[in-house]
Amino acid sequence: MLTVEQVMASQKASVETLLGLTSKAFEGVEKIVELNLTASKAALAESTEHAKAMLNVKDAQELIALQSAMLQPLAEKTAAYSRHLYDIATGSTAELNKTFESQAADAQKQFLGLVETATKNAPAGSESAVAVLKSSVAAANNALESVQKAVKQATEAAESNFNSVTASTVDAVKTSTKKR
């Protein structure tokens, strides 16, 4: 049976966790806003320089060369921006996952404690029901661990694919601009 102190401690821990998660979420948003402001300032400065350069173009060939020269750095900057945004998102997600895993582990410990208490106080003759309950808890724990491993592997595969696609895109743009 839970005491008032245990319930209050649980509520306090839940509120602290919520506040921590909210803080982490805002940190991620702040990083994205900072990234977007930096990228916007850089894009404005580069657009200004490009516009000035276009005003000095004397013929179509020079215009094509100017456009080609701008294309490769743009692709590289877009890839870098995407990578930075991806890093912010995965970093924030990792922090949230750590918190959720910690909370799940704590909840699991509390539940196992309740199961242990219940099994100690079980009436005589209920040994088979207790064994089934313990077996079910063990199966649920194994399933949870399997899901966590699968999510981790999927995340690693997604990151690998993201890196591969980004590198391929930049390489394709480099090849394309060299051919012109």
Image (cartoon, rainbow, N blue to C red):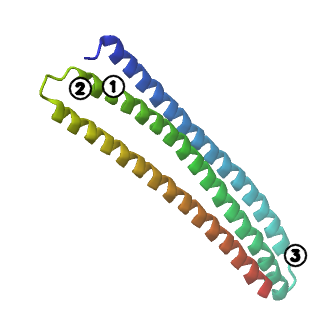
Disc 3 marks a residue whose amino acid type is: Asn
Q: Is residue 52 above or below residue 132?
A: below
For label 3, count other residues whose C-alpha is less than 10 Å away and answer few (under 14), some (14-19) or many (20+).
few
Quadrant (top left, top right, bottom left, bottom right) of the N terminus: top left
What x and y, as percent, mark residue 19? 49, 28
Q: Which residue is mark 2?
A: 119
Please name the residue shown 78% across and 62% down the image: 46
Looking at the rendered structure, the secondary structure element under dot 1 is helix
Is residue 150 something that shows in the picture?
yes
Looking at the rendered structure, the secondary structure element under dot 2 is helix
Q: Is residue 39 above or below residue 142?
A: below
Please report whichever mark, 2 or 3, sits nearer to the chain's N-terminal start. 3
Residues tagged 3 and 1 counted as in contact (Cβ below 8 A): no
Q: Which mark is residue 113?
A: 1
Looking at the rendered structure, the secondary structure element under dot 3 is loop
Quadrant (top left, top right, bottom left, bottom right) of the C terminus: bottom right
Instruction: Describe residue 143's horizontal placement relative to residue 132 as left or right.
Output: right
What x and y, as percent, mark residue 153? 51, 57
